[in-house]
């Protein structure tokens, strides 16, 4: 009877574990599907602000404009139609609000019923005009007015675009390239700083430090891993940023270099703890055999201990990189938060996680800005997945060599 009850209990526990694993897996799949569904919806949005249209004079030979060109026109960076493939002539940007400076409310009629007609007259009288108007007030059928086609946002404009200005009117600039490069720049240099330091400390704790020293340092390192990221951000903002600015003579201290230093400090505890545990798991017999064959302690460390612990060290590096790539608040506080193309480690940058955290609460749900932030999340997901796959390949190769 007891045996039957034990078997029944084991089956119930096994079923609960199976159910838990299935629910967890399904939840992860649904999150990924939702992320990509929202993100890819960006490419169904028009290049011009939704609900608006661009109109030109019917005699204007220009048939279409890219978002970057539209922004330059309304920022007065492009002033002649010849630069856009049209006939030479001054460009006259016209925003919808300008109509109220030309006509009185009485002339526009009750509920602005005459507005489409008046807009048509303005466009007809100015051959060089480009008017940004709501679609509900588009000029009625008029031989002198031509509405430019509103193509959807192209993947190339997002992934290769060099400007991130999602609130720009009339055409949002949704170029993710500066954000992706800023993320990689900060993360790569953070790992280049943290990896050698972390491995050095791990080797010391595992192979060189006395038991008393290790008993003091190991808990301190693990305690650093539990400090909230915003605390590291405050430390970087108050201590590192002024020091970097003064030492390097920079206009501002909030740079990619400051972000790399803060991320390196944050990644160190994870790298040290996991790598040290992996090294200490090296069998004592292998160490003794190496020493017995005449190898020095350092030769034993880099020829026996480190190769044996490669899998654990790889896991430490992956977790450290993941911490660096996905960090938000600390990076947001010390990198200057400037969404521009990075040209140097000593310039302000903005990362993908910082952009999502700073803008998601202000982006209208379902709009192009909102969906572009989800697509940035997709990029972050892919970067993290590639890092994990690379680590798995390295671990399999090492396992195939028998751990040595």
Image: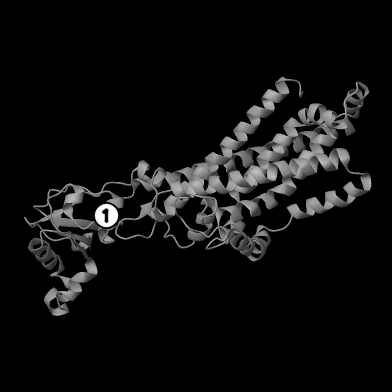
Location of the N terminus (image quadrant): top right
How packed is label 1: few (under 14 Cα within 10 Å), some, or many (20 or more)?
A: many
Please report the residue visible at 15 percent of the width from the left and 69 percent of the height from the top.
Answer: 115
Vertical placement of residue 152 versus 228, above or below: above
Vertical placement of residue 307 versus 24, above or below: above
The answer, for residue 280, to whether it is visible in the render is: yes
Which residue is at the front of the view, 261 or 158?
A: 261
Left or right side of 114 for 7 = right
Location of the C terminus (image quadrant): top right
Tell me, what colour scheme is on the image? one colour
Q: Position of residue 323 (x, y in %)?
A: 64, 47
Please report the residue visible at 69 percent of the width from the left and 58 percent of the height from the top.
Answer: 228
Vertical placement of residue 334 versus 372, above or below: below
Q: Which residue is mark 1?
A: 70
The answer to which quarter of the image holds residue 317 is: top right
Marks counted in the figure total: 1
Q: Position of residue 208 (x, y in %)?
A: 88, 40
Q: Position of residue 17 (x, y in %)?
A: 72, 38
Which residue is at the front of the view, 150 or 27?
A: 150
Please report the residue visible at 53 percent of the width from the left and 39 percent of the height from the top.
Answer: 382
Q: Position of residue 102 (x, y in %)?
A: 15, 74
């Amino acid at each position: 009877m007891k045996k039957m009850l034990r078997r029944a209990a084991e089956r119930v526990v096994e079923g609960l574990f199976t159910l838990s694993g299935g629910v967890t897996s399904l939840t992860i799949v649904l999150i990924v599907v939702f992320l990509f569904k929202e993100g890819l919806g960006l490419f169904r949005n028009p290049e011009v602000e939704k609900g608006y249209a661009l109109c030109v004079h019917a005699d204007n030979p220009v048939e279409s404009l890219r978002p970057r060109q539209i922004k330059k026109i309304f920022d007065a960076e492009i002033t002649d139609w010849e630069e856009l493939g049209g006939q030479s002539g001054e460009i006259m940007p016209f925003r919808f609000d300008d109509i109220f400076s030309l006509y009185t409310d009485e002339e526009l009629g009750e509920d602005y019923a005459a507005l489409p007609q008046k807009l048509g007259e303005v466009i007809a009288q100015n051959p060089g005009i480009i008017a940004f108007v709501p679609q509900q007030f588009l000029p009625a059928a008029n031989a002198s007015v031509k509405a430019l086609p509103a193509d959807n946002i192209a993947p190339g404009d997002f992934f290769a675009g060099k400007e991130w200005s999602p609130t720009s009117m009339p055409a949002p600039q949704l170029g993710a390239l500066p954000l992706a490069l800023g993320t990689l720049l900060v993360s790569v240099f953070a790992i280049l700083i943290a990896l050698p330091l972390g491995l050095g400390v791990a080797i010391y704790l595992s192979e060189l430090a006395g038991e008393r020293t290790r008993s003091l340092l190991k808990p301190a390192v693990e305690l650093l891993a539990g400090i909230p990221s915003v605390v590291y951000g405050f430390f970087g903002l108050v201590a590192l940023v002024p020091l970097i600015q003064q030492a390097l003579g920079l206009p501002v201290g909030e740079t990619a270099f400051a972000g790399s230093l803060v991320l390196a400090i944050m990644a160190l505890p994870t790298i040290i703890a996991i790598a040290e545990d992996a090294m200490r798991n090296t069998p004592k017999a292998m160490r003794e055999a190496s020493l017995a064959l005449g190898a020095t302690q350092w030769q034993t460390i880099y020829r026996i201990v480190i190769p044996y612990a490669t899998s654990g060290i790889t896991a430490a590096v992956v977790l450290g990189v993941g911490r660096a790539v996905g960090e938000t608040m600390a990076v947001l506080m010390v990198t200057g938060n400037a969404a521009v193309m990075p040209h140097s480690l000593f310039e302000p940058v903005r990362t993908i996680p910082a952009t999502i955290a700073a803008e998601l609460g202000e982006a209208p749900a379902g709009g192009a800005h909102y969906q572009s932030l989800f697509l940035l999340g997709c990029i972050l997901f892919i970067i993290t997945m590639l890092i994990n796959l690379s680590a798995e390949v390295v671990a399999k190769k090492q396992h195939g060599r028998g751990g040595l």
